[in-house]
Amino acid sequence: VAPDVPSALGHPDVQAVLIASATITHAAYISLAARAGKPILCEKPIDLDLARVRKCRADLAEHPVPVQIGFNRRFDPGHAAIRKAVQSGEIGRLEKLIITSRDPCEPPVDYLRASGGLFRDMMIHDFDMTRFILGEEVVELTAMGSAAPGTAAASIGDLHTAMVTMKSTSGVLCHINCSRHASYGYDQRIEAFGPEGMLISNNVTATNLERYGNDVTSAREPLLHFFIERYQASYQAELRSFIRSVKEGVPPSPSFEDGERALAMADAALESLQTRAMVPLCT
Amino acid sequence: VAPDVPSALGHPDVQAVLIASATITHAAYISLAARAGKPILCEKPIDLDLARVRKCRADLAEHPVPVQIGFNRRFDPGHAAIRKAVQSGEIGRLEKLIITSRDPCEPPVDYLRASGGLFRDMMIHDFDMTRFILGEEVVELTAMGSAAPGTAAASIGDLHTAMVTMKSTSGVLCHINCSRHASYGYDQRIEAFGPEGMLISNNVTATNLERYGNDVTSAREPLLHFFIERYQASYQAELRSFIRSVKEGVPPSPSFEDGERALAMADAALESLQTRAMVPLCT
Amino acid sequence: VAPDVPSALGHPDVQAVLIASATITHAAYISLAARAGKPILCEKPIDLDLARVRKCRADLAEHPVPVQIGFNRRFDPGHAAIRKAVQSGEIGRLEKLIITSRDPCEPPVDYLRASGGLFRDMMIHDFDMTRFILGEEVVELTAMGSAAPGTAAASIGDLHTAMVTMKSTSGVLCHINCSRHASYGYDQRIEAFGPEGMLISNNVTATNLERYGNDVTSAREPLLHFFIERYQASYQAELRSFIRSVKEGVPPSPSFEDGERALAMADAALESLQTRAMVPLCT
Amino acid sequence: VAPDVPSALGHPDVQAVLIASATITHAAYISLAARAGKPILCEKPIDLDLARVRKCRADLAEHPVPVQIGFNRRFDPGHAAIRKAVQSGEIGRLEKLIITSRDPCEPPVDYLRASGGLFRDMMIHDFDMTRFILGEEVVELTAMGSAAPGTAAASIGDLHTAMVTMKSTSGVLCHINCSRHASYGYDQRIEAFGPEGMLISNNVTATNLERYGNDVTSAREPLLHFFIERYQASYQAELRSFIRSVKEGVPPSPSFEDGERALAMADAALESLQTRAMVPLCT
């Protein structure tokens, strides 16, 4: 933590604190901002260590302030529309949820080393999205993963690609498949299935230009490159939502608990990978 | 006409006559088959000369037999579904019809020389499709066209590409755009527009395979190459329809008059191209 | 013109003038701003009367200032991508251009009365788009139109729907089809065709959500409602472009001449509608 | 087995035997036809009991004849194109395979009772498809499933919906998700992912008609209803392939072993469901 932060946080002009620093500093800054009585918008993950997250939660219990965790994808118009349609019963009682989540290219090995691994760094977004759309908890999961030789992930014993399958309290089957790379761009899709139909929040392109070329194929525009482009609108909506929550005095969402639960799911996935067994989750 | 045809046509085992020979022979074979009292399925066009078509019609008046003209596209499932939806009022009173019709590549110059030109050889299908979907006649039209230097069409004074705009009895605006080539395959689309909506009969591909490649684009399968592939089902349905008509004793469709009217539209388009004016059509 | 405008325009704090008032006032404000030496961004159309537009141009010749006309659609990412691809030769020498342009619903009759008619009020955007993508002038055009009984347009002798076909200097065939209504939303599509392929700038939806419902159909999201939603990004880019032009001292685009030429095309379309003949255009 | 079958099978006019009777009779007919020395095309599954399948294999070892198992989906043009593209290296070394397989509606409870359960009756197709596209064996799998209250499946302790996740010899992650119902039609999709791209064999509709309606949505045609419609071409290709194999004296495919292995995978899935653990497979 930077030495001048504590006093700066206490300044009366500071109405709220946005934490977008390195993950390792999140919990400390949350505790400091809470002690200063300031509402907090903190980037995900809260921390890579569930014990430290729980200690941070204890701090917040003593110094309660509104806390929002930066699961920006909840604010994506397409994903939010799926959640809304599912919760309104448009497809009946949800039966299945399938999330595809692939980054365009593997980050550098230094980033990976500090990342906490694929489950905590990347799939944590999808664990949160699962809970967001379900509107209930996951009770058990199994995980599989691999890293092709020659990938940075393989060189440090991390995963390059993974599949997790889950069951929720009410019996919904959920599947997440993640990859650290996708040669065709940032692949972000969600499919919800129920007795009355199916909803797909599909990928997004920069324009709706279609090209029918000389080689007799028709091509749509490439997918947007990465999260900066794909989730631009969601970052803006996330911030607006936080500001509105603080101004109107209503609890912000996603909450600290949402951040904690997503991390617990990542830990369970890692455990399943190691034990090759189904892992139950507290609900 | 081959010398042994007349007697062969009279053979009692011949139940019907299919005329798929060179265009120049169609009218003569129609007259022969009519004199022999046989139902006829004749490839389009009836003839390139409207006067000869009318003479053939006079022959048929003397020797009435069922005649179906080979406008196979009326039997395409997508195009037929547009016609049905329009006629059933699904989009309200039709306001606009837009037909796109592009062959994959220019035929040899010898074919073009005998073809009667783009309007009579190629756009005649689209003139028929216009009348089929409208369910009424076209009252006037204007045409524009061109042939890029270096095309076979240019070398013989024919058109390589053309646009025709028409108005129907009840005021529907119609547009056909035709090209002798399309680098991406056989392009056959129909769009109908009315106060209650729009219908598009879109292009067809061999499979629904999608490819998301290394160059970050997503490509759908190529369009089917040409009419043999694209209209395979329609040729089969055309023949089944003719056989059923003959068996059940109901008049086949499209009729001889349909063939005559489409040719009259082609002639009007040619006249408009030469006079640079709107050309009225008898209805 | 409001009485306090002239002096206000002269104020040194005024760096540029944006004219978004009623069409009837555009020309007068342009002249005033030009006399005050201020760069101008003026909404389309410059005026409904070509004579007055030319008089305004004479004023600008005496008091030259940068002028940009508000053809915002040139800044739409999809349409701009078509122009760029066409101009870069991606589909070879352009052969055909087809523009579909339909508003979601007819404006009130009072708006229509003052609008100058469908060609000058609505299709003027598409005339500009034609020139923008062609990169050259149109040399002749023919027009057809109609207004269904019961429409506001019919009640005042205006058009409700229209088709215009054009030829450019180098022989490109162009087609615009416009409607004052579309039950399914704002329909804005552009198709460019050449020997090496086809490009389509397709409609835009709010999200990429797909719905597969109980009635066994799959539905994509509705089209965006109207120009405010559909061309939001283009309005923003238009303004940024104007500001950059003024700052960098480069001539803004689209220019005053672009505004004048689009109006001349609208007048020619009206003439063709009345004379039922091909109308040549000065180039 | 019908009493007159054995002698009929021996008749010299019988060149090959097609077994499309109830599953319970498959193994017996295979053995009979093998003893009669006739090539066999047998519907899947060979039997619901792996022990009986192995006994049948022993019979075939004694009386070797060509045997093809009716995994018709291998002959679907889209699915076959995926297999071909994967095997040719179009997307690099395969990393993931995701199969979606949903029937339009649950069969009657009597059918379910005799079916062997969702894994052996329905997902067996997808297990075969997995091996077909992989071109190698699956080494381990985990399964989850459920049956919503009120379904026929629930009433007899079968599954209504299930997810299976697998890993192959070379480390490819595979996922199958199956449902006994889909309100929007027969949902059959395959997605293959590798370092050089992604391939999707998407659903098929009867025509490419698009409807843009009054309620401002755009709808594509419904999915084909069920396997009879969706896999019509594959059934025809399957039969042609069998006949060609027999005529040319080459081993037919998919083979008896393919049928056995798919059943072993179904059994493993059932075991995983019961033990809640990863189940290894012999390769």
Image (cartoon, coloured by chain):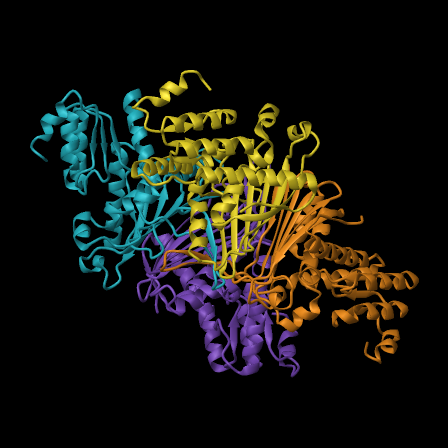
Chain colours: A cyan, B orange, C yellow, D purple
* Left or right for D163, reference B102: left
- In x, y percent, where is residue A102? 33, 51
Residue sitting at the far top: C3
In-image side of B161 versus D155 (left or right): right
Q: Residue at horizontal 43%, vertical 46%?
A: C80
Residue B248 at what x, y percent from top left? 83, 59
Q: Residue furthest front?
A: C62
Residue situated furthest right in the rendering: B62
Q: Is residue C187 visible?
A: no
Q: Quadrant of residue A95?
A: top left
For residue C216, say whether it is visible: yes
Where residue B226 appears, x then y in whole percent?
60, 65
Closer to us: C45 or C53: C53
Between B261 and C206, the one nearer to me in the picture: B261
In this view, A37 is above or below A29: above
Quarter the N terminus of chain B occupies: bottom right
Is residue C98 positioned above or below A134 on the image?
below
Label count reads: 0
In the image, what residue occupies the spot 52% across and 50% down? C191
Q: Is residue A27 above or below residue D183?
A: above
Q: Position of residue B8 (x, y in %)?
A: 85, 77
Q: Residue C109, relative to residue D67: is it above or below?
A: above
**Residue nearest the observer in this picture, A72 or A57:** A72
Taking D10 as reference, is D280 left or right?
left
